[in-house]
Image (cartoon, rainbow, N blue to C red):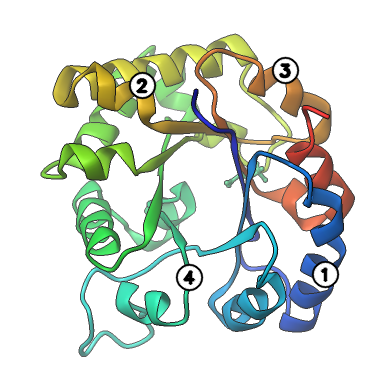
Amino acid sequence: MRKKVIAGNWKMNMLPNEAIEFITELTPKVARTQNEVILCVPYTDLFYALLTAQDTNIKIGAQNMHWEEKGAFTGEVSGKMLKCINVEYVIIGHSERRQYFGETDEFVNKKIKSAFINGLKPIVCVGETLEQREKGITKEIITNQVEKALEGLTNEQVQNTIIAYEPIWAIGTGKTATSEDANNSIKDIRAKIAEIYGKDVAEEVIIQYGGSVKSSNAKELFEMSDIDGALVGGASLKVDEFAKIVNYDE
Ligand code: PGA
């Protein structure tokens, strides 16, 4: 049985004092859950978030990293730097990074490999644009993104990769894919992983849905056969709303 993994993506929101307050309030609300709870916070919040989440079941992640260990890459942060302060997870290839910062499948692949070298667990985002969906090429786009992202990884690494299927047209728009559509796309991704890495690996991989997930639609999505949780943007900025998503099965 795969676990449900619910990860908040704060994007460029929350100052350190707000992060401390949020995590302090969230802690008792999610203390009993069996689901995995992750908050991916801005770099400047990481240290405070890690301290506040110590001895709780809330895990902390970053939202990006560079693939090199160190060097002349002004403004970048490496996987090694994240690991040394005890960050556990890192989002890689979010559509906003692909769209606004020119991140390619090749960068995504390098970053995932570097995340594993440094002992970080990657949350890898894939998803189609509205135009691609309307052209009927969603399956081709997302399975191709997954194949390129995972290229050259060992079976064990693939098994430990979290994939977030996030249709771009559903991010921050209030539009959610129907639970059937989301489940079918996730099944397509799982089938592609089975084809390359084998069925046993594919059955273990956590594949989340992302795109306007909120407490009112979480249960329906999470009860689908292949949806293993969510990457949550907007709704992860409100403590009660995020706690409700985590506790969808209570
Ligand atoms: P959203 O964002 O929940 O605000 O749509 C999801 C994401 O970008 O990961």
Figure check: 95 above or below 218: below
User: Disc 1 marks which residue?
Assistant: 24
Which amino acid is tagged 4?
A: Val
Q: Position of residue 50 (x, y in %)?
A: 61, 75
Which element carries disc 4, helix, strand or loop? loop
| Amino acid, disc 1 | Thr
- How far apart are the two marked residues, 3 and 4, measured between alpha carbons? 31 Å
- Mark found first going from the N terminus, 3 or 4: 4
What's the mark number on residue 220? 3
- Asked if disc 3 and disc 4 are in contact, CB closer than 8 Å, the reply is no
The reply, left or right, for residue 148 in relation to residue 250 is: left
Q: Residue at x 16, y 45 (%)?
A: 153
**In the image, which disc is placed on residue 87?**
4
**Which residue is identified by label 2?**
203
Furthest-left residue in this view: 152
Q: How far apart are the alpha carbons under marks 3 and 1?
A: 28 Å
Label drawn at residue 222: none
Write down the quadrant of residue 22 in the picture: bottom right
- Image quadrant containing the C terminus: top right
Chain-order first, disc 4 or disc 1: 1
Say what amino acid the circle numbered 3 marks: Glu
Crowding near pointer 2: few (<14 within 10 Å), some, many (20+)?
some
Q: Is residue 50 above or below residue 113?
A: below
Residue, x 65% and y 39% (percent of image)?
Answer: 35
Disc 2 to disc 1, C-alpha distance: 35 Å
Q: Looking at mark 2, is its residue's CB closer than 8 Å to ligand 1?
A: no
Q: Is residue 81 left or right of residue 51?
A: left
**Ligand number 1: quarter of image:** top right
Some atom of ligand 1 lies within 8 Å of the CB belonging to the residue at label 1 = no
